Image: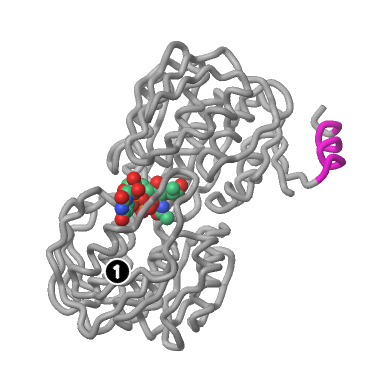
Amino acid sequence: MEQYIIKGGIPLVGEIDISGAKNAALPIISAAIMSDETVTLENIPDVNDINVLLEAIEKIGARIVRVDRHTVKINGSTISECGVDLESMKKIRASYYLLGSLLGKYKKAEVPLPGGCNIGSRPIDLHLKGFRAMGVKVDLRYGNVIAGCDCMHGAHIFLDIVSVGATINIMIAASMASGRTIIENAAKEPHVVDVANFLNSMGANIKGAGTDVIRINGVEKLHGTTYSIVPDMIEAGTFMVAAAATRGDVVLRNVIPKHLEAMRAKLEEIGCEVEGGDDSLRVVAKHRLNRAHVKTQPYPGFPTDMQPQIGVLLALAEGTSIVTESIFENRFKYVDELARMGASIKVEGNTAIIDGVDKLTAAQISAPDLRAGAALVVAGLTAEGFTIVDDIGYIKRGYEDFDAKLRSLGAEIETVTSERDIQKFKLKVG
Ligand code: EPZ
């Protein structure tokens, strides 16, 4: 079982490149099969979720050529079936984007219903509501979504909840429906915009992505394209917090500063210095940081995917902070692990009350999910002693070379698989 071992207390200093956004690449890869021509995707992150999805579309017959770690060619002309297997769905929820792309292209799809996950129940009722509004017959049988129709038409859809997945999935399907679809109360995340830009580069006709009203005029065919994935704002935010938590000085390259405004504002509010360049951001923290209130919101608000990371940062701040999670119902599972490192946090419903402590001490902890896992690594980077993080497979689903990037900033962190490796690390770093 792979683990991270971390010797804490070292300020992160230096520069790193941010990878492409996992949450943009997943729907874009799913949508790429809608063309019968070759689609070349650049700047894709080399993370497990991406590799699992590429396997899933290869299984239904698409041709995949991995040019290099970050570039893939996809050709959907050889797709032989419109059913996604359970194994793929169990490994990665975002396989549900294949519902939208298979419906758009073939007007039929069969995809296992995604289960809940570590952060909440995460239904897809809004996705299905959108498909039904476009004339698709959707049945739920034996744990599968079985969807199809003779002609998928445009519709005027109002999303009851701002949902990234539902916005993107409906947009993908509507790009090849006949007629006009309007999505109201749409999600505005940068990865929603990236999917719209990608589809338009294939010949789709989508306007308004990034606002809460998206208009899609369906087209008959989508052609091949070459497209580069937007930088990952959550990976960038995670490293911003790591720089701040370790009182370091880190430059993030290959970012879009506009996407990081909510994180930047919060870090400056608690005492960090943040300098923005055209495609870079520098974070400096020279002293102990101050308390703050944080409430997660849909973009452009403070992202829920950054809630565990800011929770760790505030656990070390001066004073009492309050973090409210308004998107998911079970996203404080890192708190128990953090308490074992000396943090003082009380969770009441969807709110965490955090009394800042001077320092954290090392412990053996386990990653409860992707973002909480990354946040606990940040905690280990600050803690006195040797922290061991279990279940790092969660982290590898969404962060490319996480430990290597941290090492390039001076962190003492390694992936280990045995007690012998742990002892060797301790001897090496002393
Ligand atoms: C996407 O999940 C991201 N995942 C999540 O990132 C992210 O936390 C989330 O958006 C919010 O930004 C991917 O993009 C692969 P939602 P998604 O639909 O689309 C409820 C990570 O760490 N809802 O915006 O599933 C839902 O339960 C992951 O990278 C319904 O009720 O999120 C939640 O409470 C974690 N019915 C709220 O809406 C639906 O049909 C927002 O969910 C859909 C959603």
Image vertical order of residue 109 relative to residue 240, above or below: below
- Seen at 48% across and 17% down, the residue is 317
- Residue 25 in view here: yes
**Residue 330, how many percent across, how many down?**
44, 38
On the rendered structure, is 243 left or right of 182?
right
Q: Height in image: 84 above or below 12?
A: below
At 82% from the left and 32% from the top, the residue drawn is 426
- Image point 58% across, 47% down: which residue? 395
Kind of residue at disc 1: Ile
Q: Is residue 419 magenta?
A: yes
Residue 50, given in percent of the width and then of the height, sits at 52, 62
Q: Quadrant of residue 130?
A: bottom left
Residue 174: name its quadrant: bottom left
Q: Is residue 234 left or right of residue 210?
A: right
Along the line of sight, which residue is nearer the eye, 228 or 142?
A: 142
Q: Position of residue 72 (x, y in %)?
A: 51, 72
Q: In this orientation, does residue 190 appear?
A: no
Residue 362's place in the image compared with 330, above or below, is above
Q: Residue at x 29, y 42 (%)?
A: 298
**Residue 122 in picture, x, y percent from top left:** 38, 51
Q: Nearer the viewer, residue 158 or 412?
A: 158
- Residue ID for mark 1: 172
Q: What's the magenta region?
A: 418-427
Q: Secondary structure at mark 1?
A: helix
Q: Residue furthest front?
A: 142
What color scheme is it? one colour
Q: Judge the density around disc 1: few (<14), some (14-19), many (≥20) Cα neighbours within 10 Å.
A: many
